[in-house]
Image (spheres, coloured by chain):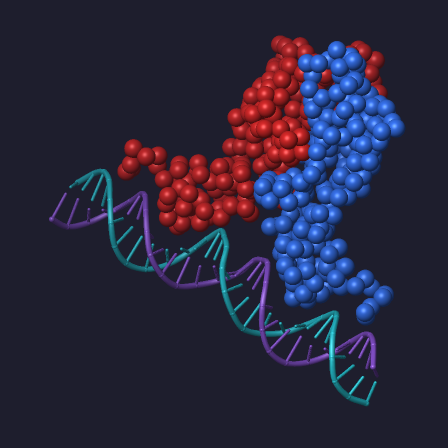
Chain colours: A red, B blue, C purple, D cyan
Amino acid sequence: MKQEKDKKTEDKIKQVARMMFIQKGFTGTTTREIATEAGTNLALVNYYFRSKEQLFKQIMLESLHEFFESVVDILNDSHTSLEIKLERLVERYINQLNQHPDIPMFILSEIRSNPEIFLNEFLKGTKLRQTVLFNQLTAHLQEKQKLNINPIHIMMNVLSMTLFPFIVKPMICHVTEMPEDEYRALMLERKKLIPMWVKQMVN
Amino acid sequence: MKQEKDKKTEDKIKQVARMMFIQKGFTGTTTREIATEAGTNLALVNYYFRSKEQLFKQIMLESLHEFFESVVDILNDSHTSLEIKLERLVERYINQLNQHPDIPMFILSEIRSNPEIFLNEFLKGTKLRQTVLFNQLTAHLQEKQKLNINPIHIMMNVLSMTLFPFIVKPMICHVTEMPEDEYRALMLERKKLIPMWVKQMVN
DNA sequence: AATTGTTTTAAACATATGTTTAATTATTGA
DNA sequence: TCAATAATTAAACATATGTTTAAAACAATT
Protein backbone atom coordinates (compact mmCIF):
# COMPACT_ATOMS: atom_id res chain seq x y z
CA MET A 1 0.00 0.00 0.00
CA LYS A 2 1.31 3.42 -0.84
CA GLN A 3 -0.68 6.60 -0.64
CA GLU A 4 -3.20 7.61 1.98
CA LYS A 5 -3.48 11.33 1.39
CA ASP A 6 -5.09 11.24 -2.04
CA LYS A 7 -7.53 8.45 -2.85
CA LYS A 8 -5.92 5.38 -4.28
CA THR A 9 -5.59 5.61 -8.04
CA GLU A 10 -7.82 2.61 -8.50
CA ASP A 11 -10.67 4.38 -6.76
CA LYS A 12 -9.94 7.61 -8.53
CA ILE A 13 -10.16 5.92 -11.91
CA LYS A 14 -13.41 4.27 -11.00
CA GLN A 15 -14.92 7.43 -9.66
CA VAL A 16 -14.00 9.40 -12.76
CA ALA A 17 -15.15 6.58 -15.02
CA ARG A 18 -18.53 6.48 -13.29
CA MET A 19 -19.11 10.14 -13.91
CA MET A 20 -18.13 9.90 -17.53
CA PHE A 21 -20.03 6.71 -18.31
CA ILE A 22 -23.17 8.10 -16.72
CA GLN A 23 -22.85 11.34 -18.57
CA LYS A 24 -21.75 10.11 -21.98
CA GLY A 25 -22.36 6.39 -22.10
CA PHE A 26 -20.04 3.49 -22.86
CA THR A 27 -19.15 4.32 -26.45
CA GLY A 28 -19.03 8.03 -25.72
CA THR A 29 -16.26 7.57 -23.18
CA THR A 30 -12.65 6.72 -24.04
CA THR A 31 -10.07 5.08 -21.83
CA ARG A 32 -7.70 7.92 -22.58
CA GLU A 33 -10.20 10.48 -21.32
CA ILE A 34 -10.73 8.48 -18.17
CA ALA A 35 -6.99 8.28 -17.54
CA THR A 36 -6.40 11.96 -18.22
CA GLU A 37 -9.34 13.05 -16.10
CA ALA A 38 -8.16 10.82 -13.27
CA GLY A 39 -4.67 12.26 -13.59
CA THR A 40 -3.12 8.88 -14.22
CA ASN A 41 -1.59 6.83 -16.97
CA LEU A 42 -3.63 5.19 -19.69
CA ALA A 43 -2.33 1.72 -18.97
CA LEU A 44 -3.50 1.85 -15.38
CA VAL A 45 -7.11 1.58 -16.46
CA ASN A 46 -6.37 -1.85 -17.83
CA TYR A 47 -3.95 -2.63 -15.05
CA TYR A 48 -6.65 -2.25 -12.42
CA PHE A 49 -9.78 -3.23 -14.34
CA ARG A 50 -8.56 -5.57 -17.10
CA SER A 51 -10.64 -3.81 -19.75
CA LYS A 52 -12.93 -0.90 -20.41
CA GLU A 53 -15.84 -3.31 -20.52
CA GLN A 54 -15.05 -4.82 -17.11
CA LEU A 55 -14.84 -1.37 -15.62
CA PHE A 56 -18.14 -0.46 -17.21
CA LYS A 57 -19.90 -3.56 -15.95
CA GLN A 58 -18.83 -2.87 -12.39
CA ILE A 59 -20.18 0.64 -12.58
CA MET A 60 -23.41 -0.37 -14.27
CA LEU A 61 -24.09 -3.03 -11.67
CA GLU A 62 -23.56 -0.53 -8.90
CA SER A 63 -25.80 2.02 -10.61
CA LEU A 64 -28.58 -0.49 -11.04
CA HIS A 65 -28.26 -1.58 -7.47
CA GLU A 66 -28.33 1.99 -6.25
CA PHE A 67 -31.35 2.63 -8.43
CA PHE A 68 -33.50 -0.33 -7.43
CA GLU A 69 -32.30 -1.01 -3.92
CA SER A 70 -33.63 2.30 -2.70
CA VAL A 71 -37.20 1.32 -3.49
CA VAL A 72 -37.35 -2.46 -3.39
CA ASP A 73 -37.85 -2.57 0.37
CA ILE A 74 -40.73 -0.13 0.07
CA LEU A 75 -42.36 -2.23 -2.64
CA ASN A 76 -42.23 -5.30 -0.44
CA ASP A 77 -43.05 -3.88 2.98
CA SER A 78 -45.98 -5.98 4.16
CA HIS A 79 -46.85 -3.65 7.03
CA THR A 80 -47.88 -0.56 5.10
CA SER A 81 -50.96 0.29 3.11
CA LEU A 82 -51.09 0.91 -0.61
CA GLU A 83 -51.40 4.64 -0.02
CA ILE A 84 -48.41 4.84 2.24
CA LYS A 85 -46.33 2.79 -0.18
CA LEU A 86 -47.20 5.10 -3.03
CA GLU A 87 -46.25 8.15 -1.04
CA ARG A 88 -42.99 6.69 0.16
CA LEU A 89 -42.10 5.30 -3.23
CA VAL A 90 -42.54 8.59 -5.02
CA GLU A 91 -40.87 10.57 -2.27
CA ARG A 92 -37.82 8.36 -2.17
CA TYR A 93 -37.53 8.12 -5.91
CA ILE A 94 -37.66 11.85 -6.41
CA ASN A 95 -35.08 12.39 -3.69
CA GLN A 96 -32.89 9.78 -5.34
CA LEU A 97 -33.33 11.38 -8.75
CA ASN A 98 -32.50 14.81 -7.43
CA GLN A 99 -29.17 13.46 -6.31
CA HIS A 100 -28.49 11.32 -9.39
CA PRO A 101 -30.64 12.71 -12.18
CA ASP A 102 -28.67 11.06 -14.97
CA ILE A 103 -28.97 7.46 -13.83
CA PRO A 104 -32.26 6.64 -15.60
CA MET A 105 -31.02 7.87 -18.97
CA PHE A 106 -27.76 6.04 -18.37
CA ILE A 107 -29.58 2.76 -17.84
CA LEU A 108 -32.06 3.28 -20.66
CA SER A 109 -29.37 4.20 -23.14
CA GLU A 110 -27.42 1.08 -22.42
CA ILE A 111 -30.51 -1.08 -22.69
CA ARG A 112 -31.10 0.47 -26.07
CA SER A 113 -27.63 -0.14 -27.40
CA ASN A 114 -27.40 -3.64 -26.01
CA PRO A 115 -30.82 -5.01 -25.12
CA GLU A 116 -30.27 -8.76 -24.85
CA ILE A 117 -27.04 -8.70 -22.89
CA PHE A 118 -28.35 -5.99 -20.66
CA LEU A 119 -31.69 -7.50 -19.79
CA ASN A 120 -30.37 -11.02 -19.35
CA GLU A 121 -27.16 -10.24 -17.57
CA PHE A 122 -28.11 -7.32 -15.36
CA LEU A 123 -31.84 -7.63 -14.80
CA LYS A 124 -32.43 -11.32 -14.39
CA GLY A 125 -34.65 -12.15 -11.46
CA THR A 126 -36.38 -8.80 -11.25
CA LYS A 127 -40.08 -9.59 -11.06
CA LEU A 128 -42.53 -6.77 -10.56
CA ARG A 129 -45.64 -8.93 -10.36
CA GLN A 130 -44.46 -10.62 -7.21
CA THR A 131 -44.11 -7.50 -5.10
CA VAL A 132 -46.44 -6.71 -2.22
CA LEU A 133 -47.31 -3.38 -3.79
CA PHE A 134 -48.46 -5.04 -6.98
CA ASN A 135 -50.69 -7.45 -5.10
CA GLN A 136 -52.18 -4.71 -2.98
CA LEU A 137 -52.86 -2.67 -6.07
CA THR A 138 -54.55 -5.60 -7.80
CA ALA A 139 -56.73 -6.24 -4.76
CA HIS A 140 -57.61 -2.59 -4.45
CA LEU A 141 -58.72 -2.34 -8.08
CA GLN A 142 -60.90 -5.37 -7.58
CA GLU A 143 -62.56 -3.86 -4.54
CA LYS A 144 -63.24 -0.68 -6.42
CA GLN A 145 -64.78 -2.59 -9.32
CA LYS A 146 -62.07 -1.36 -11.67
CA LEU A 147 -61.35 -4.74 -13.16
CA ASN A 148 -61.06 -3.27 -16.62
CA ILE A 149 -57.89 -1.47 -15.61
CA ASN A 150 -54.77 -3.61 -15.66
CA PRO A 151 -52.71 -2.78 -12.56
CA ILE A 152 -49.69 -2.51 -14.82
CA HIS A 153 -51.24 0.71 -16.11
CA ILE A 154 -51.14 2.23 -12.66
CA MET A 155 -47.60 1.07 -11.97
CA MET A 156 -46.59 2.50 -15.31
CA ASN A 157 -48.22 5.83 -14.50
CA VAL A 158 -46.37 6.12 -11.23
CA LEU A 159 -43.07 5.38 -12.91
CA SER A 160 -43.86 7.60 -15.88
CA MET A 161 -44.83 10.65 -13.91
CA THR A 162 -41.91 10.23 -11.54
CA LEU A 163 -39.07 9.33 -13.89
CA PHE A 164 -39.93 10.90 -17.21
CA PRO A 165 -39.60 14.52 -16.10
CA PHE A 166 -36.01 13.83 -15.14
CA ILE A 167 -35.28 12.18 -18.45
CA VAL A 168 -36.58 15.10 -20.49
CA LYS A 169 -35.38 17.85 -18.20
CA PRO A 170 -33.03 19.52 -20.70
CA MET A 171 -35.66 19.42 -23.42
CA ILE A 172 -38.47 20.75 -21.25
CA CYS A 173 -36.35 23.50 -19.76
CA HIS A 174 -35.60 24.52 -23.30
CA VAL A 175 -39.09 24.51 -24.82
CA THR A 176 -40.66 26.12 -21.75
CA GLU A 177 -37.83 28.63 -21.30
CA MET A 178 -37.52 27.65 -17.67
CA PRO A 179 -34.33 27.93 -15.63
CA GLU A 180 -32.99 24.72 -14.14
CA ASP A 181 -33.60 25.59 -10.49
CA GLU A 182 -37.19 26.52 -11.17
CA TYR A 183 -37.57 23.14 -12.80
CA ARG A 184 -36.01 21.47 -9.80
CA ALA A 185 -38.55 23.18 -7.55
CA LEU A 186 -41.36 21.86 -9.70
CA MET A 187 -39.95 18.37 -9.34
CA LEU A 188 -40.12 18.65 -5.58
CA GLU A 189 -43.78 19.67 -5.73
CA ARG A 190 -44.45 16.38 -7.48
CA LYS A 191 -43.65 14.41 -4.35
CA LYS A 192 -47.07 15.38 -3.02
CA LEU A 193 -48.88 15.68 -6.33
CA ILE A 194 -48.15 12.32 -7.91
CA PRO A 195 -49.52 10.22 -5.03
CA MET A 196 -52.62 12.42 -5.03
CA TRP A 197 -53.17 11.94 -8.75
CA VAL A 198 -52.62 8.21 -8.52
CA LYS A 199 -55.11 7.90 -5.69
CA GLN A 200 -57.69 9.62 -7.88
CA MET A 201 -56.99 7.05 -10.58
CA VAL A 202 -57.58 4.04 -8.40
CA ASN A 203 -60.57 5.30 -6.40
CA MET B 1 -30.70 9.65 -64.11
CA LYS B 2 -30.21 5.95 -64.17
CA GLN B 3 -32.29 3.39 -62.40
CA GLU B 4 -36.04 3.37 -61.93
CA LYS B 5 -36.61 -0.21 -60.87
CA ASP B 6 -34.72 -0.15 -57.59
CA LYS B 7 -34.72 2.99 -55.55
CA LYS B 8 -31.89 5.34 -56.35
CA THR B 9 -28.80 4.54 -54.32
CA GLU B 10 -28.91 7.91 -52.63
CA ASP B 11 -32.34 7.14 -51.23
CA LYS B 12 -31.37 3.62 -50.36
CA ILE B 13 -28.41 4.85 -48.32
CA LYS B 14 -30.57 7.35 -46.52
CA GLN B 15 -33.28 4.85 -45.78
CA VAL B 16 -30.81 2.35 -44.38
CA ALA B 17 -29.00 5.04 -42.42
CA ARG B 18 -32.24 6.20 -40.86
CA MET B 19 -33.02 2.73 -39.61
CA MET B 20 -29.57 2.26 -38.18
CA PHE B 21 -29.24 5.70 -36.61
CA ILE B 22 -32.63 5.33 -34.95
CA GLN B 23 -31.81 1.88 -33.67
CA LYS B 24 -28.21 2.38 -32.62
CA GLY B 25 -27.54 6.10 -32.51
CA PHE B 26 -24.90 8.21 -34.20
CA THR B 27 -21.80 6.75 -32.60
CA GLY B 28 -23.22 3.25 -32.71
CA THR B 29 -23.51 3.33 -36.48
CA THR B 30 -20.56 3.15 -38.88
CA THR B 31 -20.41 4.37 -42.45
CA ARG B 32 -19.18 0.96 -43.52
CA GLU B 33 -22.21 -0.72 -42.02
CA ILE B 34 -24.49 1.74 -43.77
CA ALA B 35 -22.79 1.10 -47.10
CA THR B 36 -22.84 -2.67 -46.73
CA GLU B 37 -26.44 -2.73 -45.57
CA ALA B 38 -27.42 -0.52 -48.49
CA GLY B 39 -25.56 -2.77 -50.86
CA THR B 40 -23.34 0.01 -52.13
CA ASN B 41 -19.80 1.27 -51.88
CA LEU B 42 -18.45 2.98 -48.80
CA ALA B 43 -17.39 6.09 -50.66
CA LEU B 44 -20.91 6.73 -51.92
CA VAL B 45 -22.05 7.70 -48.44
CA ASN B 46 -19.70 10.65 -48.58
CA TYR B 47 -20.30 11.19 -52.28
CA TYR B 48 -23.98 11.82 -51.72
CA PHE B 49 -24.03 13.27 -48.21
CA ARG B 50 -20.58 14.85 -47.77
CA SER B 51 -20.14 13.34 -44.30
CA LYS B 52 -21.66 11.02 -41.76
CA GLU B 53 -22.64 14.04 -39.72
CA GLN B 54 -24.49 15.72 -42.59
CA LEU B 55 -26.38 12.55 -43.26
CA PHE B 56 -27.24 12.28 -39.60
CA LYS B 57 -28.46 15.84 -39.37
CA GLN B 58 -30.81 15.37 -42.30
CA ILE B 59 -32.29 12.31 -40.71
CA MET B 60 -32.56 13.86 -37.27
CA LEU B 61 -34.32 16.92 -38.66
CA GLU B 62 -36.81 14.74 -40.47
CA SER B 63 -37.39 12.63 -37.36
CA LEU B 64 -38.00 15.67 -35.23
CA HIS B 65 -40.34 17.11 -37.80
CA GLU B 66 -42.22 13.83 -38.06
CA PHE B 67 -42.40 13.71 -34.29
CA PHE B 68 -43.67 17.22 -33.60
CA GLU B 69 -45.55 18.01 -36.78
CA SER B 70 -48.09 15.32 -36.07
CA VAL B 71 -49.27 17.08 -32.95
CA VAL B 72 -48.47 20.75 -33.35
CA ASP B 73 -51.64 21.46 -35.30
CA ILE B 74 -53.69 19.81 -32.56
CA LEU B 75 -51.96 21.90 -29.88
CA ASN B 76 -52.83 25.08 -31.73
CA ASP B 77 -56.32 24.37 -33.02
CA SER B 78 -58.37 27.28 -31.71
CA HIS B 79 -61.71 25.64 -32.51
CA THR B 80 -61.58 22.70 -30.13
CA SER B 81 -62.02 22.39 -26.40
CA LEU B 82 -59.35 21.37 -23.94
CA GLU B 83 -60.93 17.96 -23.58
CA ILE B 84 -61.03 17.27 -27.29
CA LYS B 85 -57.46 18.41 -27.68
CA LEU B 86 -56.30 16.06 -24.96
CA GLU B 87 -58.08 13.14 -26.52
CA ARG B 88 -56.78 13.86 -30.00
CA LEU B 89 -53.28 14.54 -28.78
CA VAL B 90 -52.96 11.27 -26.92
CA GLU B 91 -54.65 9.29 -29.66
CA ARG B 92 -52.43 10.64 -32.38
CA TYR B 93 -49.28 10.31 -30.35
CA ILE B 94 -49.93 6.71 -29.47
CA ASN B 95 -50.69 5.90 -33.08
CA GLN B 96 -47.51 7.62 -34.11
CA LEU B 97 -45.52 5.78 -31.48
CA ASN B 98 -46.93 2.45 -32.50
CA GLN B 99 -45.55 3.03 -35.97
CA HIS B 100 -42.22 4.51 -34.87
CA PRO B 101 -41.63 3.37 -31.31
CA ASP B 102 -37.91 4.10 -31.36
CA ILE B 103 -38.06 7.78 -32.25
CA PRO B 104 -38.35 9.16 -28.70
CA MET B 105 -35.33 7.24 -27.46
CA PHE B 106 -33.46 8.26 -30.59
CA ILE B 107 -34.10 11.93 -29.91
CA LEU B 108 -33.44 11.70 -26.18
CA SER B 109 -30.20 9.81 -26.64
CA GLU B 110 -28.86 12.42 -29.00
CA ILE B 111 -29.87 15.24 -26.69
CA ARG B 112 -27.97 13.47 -23.96
CA SER B 113 -24.79 13.01 -25.93
CA ASN B 114 -24.86 16.49 -27.40
CA PRO B 115 -27.16 18.78 -25.45
CA GLU B 116 -26.09 22.28 -26.51
CA ILE B 117 -25.78 21.65 -30.22
CA PHE B 118 -28.97 19.67 -30.24
CA LEU B 119 -31.18 22.07 -28.35
CA ASN B 120 -29.88 25.17 -30.07
CA GLU B 121 -29.61 23.84 -33.58
CA PHE B 122 -32.62 21.56 -33.82
CA LEU B 123 -35.11 22.86 -31.31
CA LYS B 124 -34.82 26.62 -31.54
CA GLY B 125 -38.17 28.32 -31.75
CA THR B 126 -40.17 25.57 -30.11
CA LYS B 127 -42.22 27.29 -27.44
CA LEU B 128 -44.73 25.29 -25.49
CA ARG B 129 -46.11 28.18 -23.44
CA GLN B 130 -47.47 29.90 -26.52
CA THR B 131 -49.70 27.09 -27.69
CA VAL B 132 -53.47 27.29 -27.55
CA LEU B 133 -53.60 24.13 -25.48
CA PHE B 134 -51.34 25.59 -22.85
CA ASN B 135 -53.46 28.72 -22.56
CA GLN B 136 -56.67 26.74 -22.36
CA LEU B 137 -55.16 24.57 -19.68
CA THR B 138 -54.04 27.59 -17.68
CA ALA B 139 -57.49 29.15 -17.90
CA HIS B 140 -59.16 25.91 -16.94
CA LEU B 141 -57.05 25.49 -13.83
CA GLN B 142 -57.90 29.03 -12.81
CA GLU B 143 -61.62 28.39 -13.20
CA LYS B 144 -61.34 25.28 -11.12
CA GLN B 145 -59.47 27.13 -8.39
CA LYS B 146 -56.40 24.98 -8.90
CA LEU B 147 -53.96 27.82 -8.97
CA ASN B 148 -51.48 25.91 -6.88
CA ILE B 149 -50.93 23.49 -9.75
CA ASN B 150 -48.56 24.73 -12.42
CA PRO B 151 -50.00 23.81 -15.82
CA ILE B 152 -46.59 22.48 -16.75
CA HIS B 153 -47.28 19.63 -14.34
CA ILE B 154 -50.31 18.58 -16.33
CA MET B 155 -48.53 18.87 -19.68
CA MET B 156 -45.73 16.82 -18.24
CA ASN B 157 -48.12 14.16 -17.04
CA VAL B 158 -49.68 13.83 -20.46
CA LEU B 159 -46.31 13.48 -22.09
CA SER B 160 -45.01 11.18 -19.37
CA MET B 161 -47.87 8.74 -19.44
CA THR B 162 -47.94 8.70 -23.22
CA LEU B 163 -44.26 8.54 -24.10
CA PHE B 164 -42.56 6.84 -21.21
CA PRO B 165 -44.14 3.42 -21.68
CA PHE B 166 -42.67 3.29 -25.17
CA ILE B 167 -39.25 4.27 -23.91
CA VAL B 168 -39.15 1.55 -21.27
CA LYS B 169 -40.95 -1.12 -23.28
CA PRO B 170 -38.08 -3.61 -23.35
CA MET B 171 -37.44 -3.20 -19.65
CA ILE B 172 -41.08 -3.49 -18.61
CA CYS B 173 -41.73 -6.47 -20.84
CA HIS B 174 -38.79 -8.10 -19.11
CA VAL B 175 -39.61 -7.37 -15.47
CA THR B 176 -43.32 -8.14 -15.91
CA GLU B 177 -42.68 -11.19 -18.07
CA MET B 178 -45.11 -9.89 -20.65
CA PRO B 179 -44.93 -10.72 -24.38
CA GLU B 180 -44.53 -7.78 -26.74
CA ASP B 181 -47.92 -8.01 -28.40
CA GLU B 182 -49.70 -8.06 -25.06
CA TYR B 183 -47.77 -4.93 -24.19
CA ARG B 184 -48.79 -3.35 -27.46
CA ALA B 185 -52.44 -4.05 -26.66
CA LEU B 186 -52.02 -2.34 -23.31
CA MET B 187 -50.62 0.69 -25.07
CA LEU B 188 -53.72 0.94 -27.22
CA GLU B 189 -55.96 0.89 -24.14
CA ARG B 190 -54.13 3.97 -22.95
CA LYS B 191 -55.60 6.06 -25.75
CA LYS B 192 -58.85 6.17 -23.78
CA LEU B 193 -57.38 5.92 -20.29
CA ILE B 194 -54.87 8.75 -20.31
CA PRO B 195 -57.37 11.49 -21.27
CA MET B 196 -59.68 10.17 -18.58
CA TRP B 197 -56.99 10.30 -15.94
CA VAL B 198 -55.91 13.77 -16.96
CA LYS B 199 -59.45 15.07 -16.80
CA GLN B 200 -59.65 13.80 -13.24
CA MET B 201 -56.51 15.72 -12.46
CA VAL B 202 -57.78 19.06 -13.70
CA ASN B 203 -61.37 18.84 -12.43
C1' DA C 1 21.54 -2.19 1.40
C1' DA C 2 19.50 -5.67 -1.33
C1' DT C 3 15.65 -8.21 -2.77
C1' DT C 4 11.05 -8.56 -3.85
C1' DG C 5 6.62 -7.27 -5.24
C1' DT C 6 3.75 -3.43 -6.64
C1' DT C 7 2.75 0.69 -9.21
C1' DT C 8 3.62 3.78 -12.93
C1' DT C 9 5.20 5.17 -17.36
C1' DA C 10 6.07 5.70 -22.38
C1' DA C 11 5.79 3.43 -26.31
C1' DA C 12 4.12 0.23 -29.50
C1' DC C 13 0.44 -2.68 -31.42
C1' DA C 14 -3.73 -3.78 -33.62
C1' DT C 15 -7.81 -2.53 -35.19
C1' DA C 16 -11.78 0.42 -36.34
C1' DT C 17 -13.52 4.12 -38.72
C1' DG C 18 -14.46 8.70 -41.26
C1' DT C 19 -12.76 10.59 -45.33
C1' DT C 20 -10.38 11.31 -49.75
C1' DT C 21 -8.29 10.09 -54.10
C1' DA C 22 -7.72 8.53 -58.56
C1' DA C 23 -9.17 5.49 -61.80
C1' DT C 24 -13.05 3.03 -64.06
C1' DT C 25 -17.63 2.42 -65.65
C1' DA C 26 -22.19 4.05 -66.89
C1' DT C 27 -25.36 7.52 -68.63
C1' DT C 28 -26.76 11.43 -71.11
C1' DG C 29 -27.14 14.95 -74.58
C1' DA C 30 -25.47 16.89 -78.86
C1' DT D 1 -20.89 8.33 -82.25
C1' DC D 2 -18.57 10.98 -79.12
C1' DA D 3 -17.63 14.10 -75.61
C1' DA D 4 -19.14 15.43 -71.11
C1' DT D 5 -21.14 14.51 -66.90
C1' DA D 6 -22.49 11.39 -63.24
C1' DA D 7 -21.99 7.16 -60.62
C1' DT D 8 -19.18 3.57 -58.82
C1' DT D 9 -15.18 1.22 -57.20
C1' DA D 10 -10.90 -0.16 -54.77
C1' DA D 11 -7.41 1.58 -52.41
C1' DA D 12 -5.09 4.64 -49.52
C1' DC D 13 -4.98 8.09 -45.78
C1' DA D 14 -5.43 9.89 -41.30
C1' DT D 15 -6.84 9.50 -37.02
C1' DA D 16 -8.95 7.49 -32.82
C1' DT D 17 -8.99 4.06 -29.55
C1' DG D 18 -8.68 -0.40 -26.68
C1' DT D 19 -4.99 -3.12 -25.30
C1' DT D 20 -0.35 -4.89 -24.40
C1' DT D 21 4.55 -4.71 -23.47
C1' DA D 22 8.77 -3.86 -21.36
C1' DA D 23 11.20 -0.97 -18.68
C1' DA D 24 11.52 2.18 -14.81
C1' DA D 25 10.20 4.02 -10.30
C1' DC D 26 8.61 3.10 -5.90
C1' DA D 27 7.63 0.77 -1.40
C1' DA D 28 8.24 -2.56 1.86
C1' DT D 29 10.55 -6.36 4.08
C1' DT D 30 14.44 -8.70 5.47
Asked whether residue B161 appears in the rendered view, the answer is no
Residue B182 x, y percent position in the rendering = 80, 33
| Along the viewing direction, whichever of A189 and A37 lies nearer the viewer | A189
- Corner quadrant of residue B128: top right
What's the residue at 35%, 34% (across, down)? A7
- Corner quadrant of residue D21: bottom left
- Corner quadrant of residue B142: top right
For the N terminus of chain A, the image quarter is top left
Residue A162 higher or lower than D1, as above or below? above
| Along the viewing direction, whichever of D11 and B137 lies nearer the viewer | B137
Number of callouts: 0
A191 to the left or right of B133: left
Residue C27 x, y percent position in the rendering = 81, 74
What's the residue at 76%, 24% (across, down)? B135
For the C terminus of chain A, the image quarter is top right
What's the residue at 40%, 49% (across, down)? A42
| Along the viewing direction, whichever of B15 and D24 lies nearer the viewer | B15
Residue A70 x, y percent position in the rendering = 56, 22
A183 to the left or right of C29: left
Residue A142 higher or lower than A115, as above or below? above
Residue B128 higher or lower than A146, as above or below? below
Residue D12 x, y percent position in the rendering = 54, 73
Asked whether residue A30 appears in the rendered view, the answer is yes
What's the residue at 80%, 31% (across, down)? B75
